């Protein structure tokens, strides 16, 4: 089995002024290449910490995390940065584009940190923008002149441009209306069909419907299959009751 | 991260904050332009002094002998014979007399000189001729005046003076030549030059030589010659070493050269330069603190951008480099503006007040500020140093930000 992510029993403990916060309490998770996984959980469940850990922005206090077979916990800051530059693409809830830069420049931004030859950059950026179906007429617009849906597609293109092993999306539809959100999720779905590995984090059950598989996180632990079936049964009957 | 990317990211960031960047570098601009203007002006003054003194003038040595007895042409002859390193030695007699023309009557200082006097001062007639040895032999009643005196005596500085007659004391003198005006002319006092022999016979009535001007031969060390002149004369006139020091009352020998005067001016200007540099460095330090303040604000404003860049794979060193380069570029831009403004200011000032400054220093003519490559290089390196010094802390602060926290910074 070709695993992109192999997470085994990771813990993350923060030191805060209030004392120690145990954000992750033994999470194990495997993601196959080409899989579209959704991690669901309410706020405070530890899903952001998990996302940061998977994205190599944070290292686990204990446990092992293999990204394409590389043990992330043994890497230093610069090696982690290198890994982020080449193997991981981030999509954020609030897009995080450079507002005064053009669309093309925003998409090319990761390439300056991955040592991509200058003459290849524009071509790769254009290919990434084509993959998210952004019309060419917007390429030279400043990113703050775009609509929310367009911005998020630019952000997805930016995540794609280095051809990463993993695309990590943190509530990518959180700032979008549902129609635009669906369009963005459609883009993720299409990328998955093209063989990209996607991990998406959300608290919205409707979003999880687009994924191949959904895991739930509560209080720093992933729910077992039995707990999950229980949860799904509850929420679906609850959902029907409301409509 | 490639150098080219670093440069283009830096340019984008600075371009976005153009107005604020410009205000921030004002301190640097002021500091650098002050230093540059000062160096350019002082360089110009030095150059003007050297050229107005001339290389010839640096060879002139002025000798005054006070022994109680009047010095005569005999003493002048002794010096010329005892010190062969001098090309020539000549005596000057001072007197004063009423000078009268149809338009004006005034008192003038009369200098009895020989042709060598003008040679030692490298002065040339702007019209007519100077005193000749023939005039000396014949005790001619001829006079050389300068352009200022022409204006005073004939009512118009451009008036044709050569050939006209002025009354000096009790005799009529023919104006034979006009010297260019010296910037040092003050008030109504004028100086006229007559043959030394004429001066002694008709104006002062004595053979006393008041000052001796000697002119060193080519290739002679003037400083050394000044020393040997002094000791030779002290031995000859039996003057005590300590009594001959300046202000000595019993008598003494005073020997000085234009070179010494130029050296003295140089050291005076060095003190001035030091003072100005201190003031400018204060401005540069204040400017540097301004840069640091702006860079810290910059980092805070762009925390999310920093978080994003880190998430996209920027290393700590990439972030440090980016912010450091921004600060260096800011300072450099300030430096370039400062250099341009400094030179513009120096040329403006030289044009407006150059002649006045030079006459105050005893020279003549205007100043042309000097553009020195070393000054430009130094100013530029100072700017880079300030950029590094005051940009380092903000840059390191930015590089050490936690990517997770910065991404969620509101």
Image (cartoon, coloured by chain):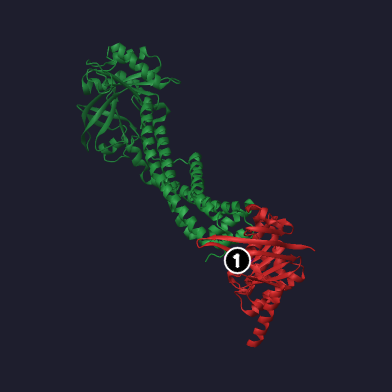
Front residue (pair A1, B342): A1
Residue A158, image x and y in percent? 66, 65
Q: Is residue B407 visible?
A: yes
- Which residue appears at 35% of the width and 26% of the height? B118
Residue at disc 1, secondary structure: loop
Q: Which residue is mark 1?
A: A97
Specify the segment rendered in magenta.
A95-103
Which chain does the residue under circle 1 lie in?
A
Evaluate whether residue A108 shows in this view: no
Q: In the image, residue A205 lies at what x, y percent?
A: 66, 77
Where does the image place residue A57, in percent across and percent down from the top left?
62, 60
Up the image or down, B259 lies above or below B20; here it is above
Give the color of chain A as drawn. red
Residue B145 higher or lower than B88, as above or below: below
Give residue B77's quadrant in the image. Answer: top left
Q: A217 or B186: which is nearer to us? A: A217
Task: Determine the colour of chain B.
Answer: green
Q: Quadrant of residue A111?
A: bottom right
């Amino acid at each position: 089995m070709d695993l992109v992510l192999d997470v085994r029993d990771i813990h993350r403990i923060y030191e805060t002024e209030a004392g120690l916060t145990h954000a992750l309490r033994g999470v194990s998770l495997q993601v196959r290449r080409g899989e579209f996984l959704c991690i669901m959980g309410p706020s405070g469940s530890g899903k952001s910490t998990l996302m940061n850990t998977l994205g190599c922005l944070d290292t686990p206090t204990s446990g092992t995390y293999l990204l394409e077979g590389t043990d992330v916990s043994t890497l230093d800051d610069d090696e982690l940065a290198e890994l982020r530059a080449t193997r991981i693409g981030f999509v954020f809830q609030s897009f995080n584009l450079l507002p005064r830069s053009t669309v093309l420049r925003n998409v090319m931004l990761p390439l300056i940190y991955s040592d991509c030859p200058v003459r290849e950059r524009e071509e790769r950026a254009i290919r990434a923008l084509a993959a998210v179906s952004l019309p060419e007429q917007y390429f030279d617009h400043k990113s703050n002149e775009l609509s929310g849906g367009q911005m998020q597609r630019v952000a997805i293109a930016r995540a794609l441009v280095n051809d990463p092993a993993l695309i990590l999306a943190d509530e990518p539809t959180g700032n979008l209306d549902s129609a635009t959100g669906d369009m963005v999720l459609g883009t993720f779905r299409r990328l998955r069909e093209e063989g990209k590995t996607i991990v998406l984090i959300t608290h919205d059950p409707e979003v999880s419907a687009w994924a191949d598989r959904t895991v739930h996180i509560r209080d720093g632990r992933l729910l077992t299959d039995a707990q999950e079936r229980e949860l799904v049964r509850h929420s679906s009957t609850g959902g029907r009751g409301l409509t | 991260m490639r150098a080219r990317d670093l440069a283009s990211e830096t340019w984008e960031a600075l371009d976005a904050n153009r107005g604020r960047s410009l205000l921030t570098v004002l301190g640097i601009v002021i500091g650098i332009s002050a230093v540059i203007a000062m160096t350019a002006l002082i360089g110009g003054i030095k150059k003007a002094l050297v050229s107005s003194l001339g290389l010839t003038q640096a060879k002139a040595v002025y000798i005054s002998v006070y022994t109680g007895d009047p010095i005569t042409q005999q003493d002048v002859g002794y010096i010329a014979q005892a010190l062969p390193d001098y090309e020539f030695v000549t005596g000057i007699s001072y007197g004063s007399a009423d000078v009268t023309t149809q338009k004006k009557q005034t008192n003038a200082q009369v200098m009895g000189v020989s042709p060598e006097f003008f040679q030692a001062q490298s002065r040339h007639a702007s019209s007519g001729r100077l005193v000749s040895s023939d005039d000396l032999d014949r005790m001619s009643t001829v006079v050389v005046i300068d352009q200022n005196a022409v204006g005073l005596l004939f009512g118009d500085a451009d008036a044709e003076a050569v050939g006209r007659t002025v009354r000096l004391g009790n005799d009529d003198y023919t104006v034979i030549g006009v010297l260019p005006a010296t910037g040092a002319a003050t008030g109504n006092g004028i100086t006229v030059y007559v043959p030394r022999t004429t001066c002694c016979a008709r104006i002062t009535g004595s053979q006393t030589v008041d000052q001796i001007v000697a002119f060193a031969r080519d290739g002679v060390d003037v400083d050394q010659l000044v020393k040997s002149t002094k000791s030779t004369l002290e031995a000859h006139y039996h003057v005590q070493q300590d009594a001959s020091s300046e202000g000595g009352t019993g008598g003494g020998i005073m020997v000085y050269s234009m070179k010494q005067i130029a050296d003295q001016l140089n050291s005076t200007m060095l003190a001035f330069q030091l003072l100005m540099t201190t003031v400018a460095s204060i401005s540069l330090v204040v400017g540097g603190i301004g840069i640091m303040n702006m860079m810290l604000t910059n980092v805070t404003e762009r925390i999310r951008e920093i978080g994003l860049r880190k998430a996209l794979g920027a290393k700590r060193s990439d972030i440090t480099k980016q912010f450091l380069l921004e600060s260096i570029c800011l300072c450099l831009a300030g430096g370039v503006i400062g250099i341009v403004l400094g030179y513009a200011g120096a040329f403006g000032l030289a044009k407006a007040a150059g002649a006045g400054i030079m006459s105050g220093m005893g020279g003549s003519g205007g100043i042309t500020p000097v553009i020195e490559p070393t000054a430009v290089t130094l100013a530029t390196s100072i700017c880079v140093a300030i950029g590094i010094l005051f940009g380092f802390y903000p840059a390191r602060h930015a590089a050490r930000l936690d990517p997770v926290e910065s991404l969620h910074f509101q």
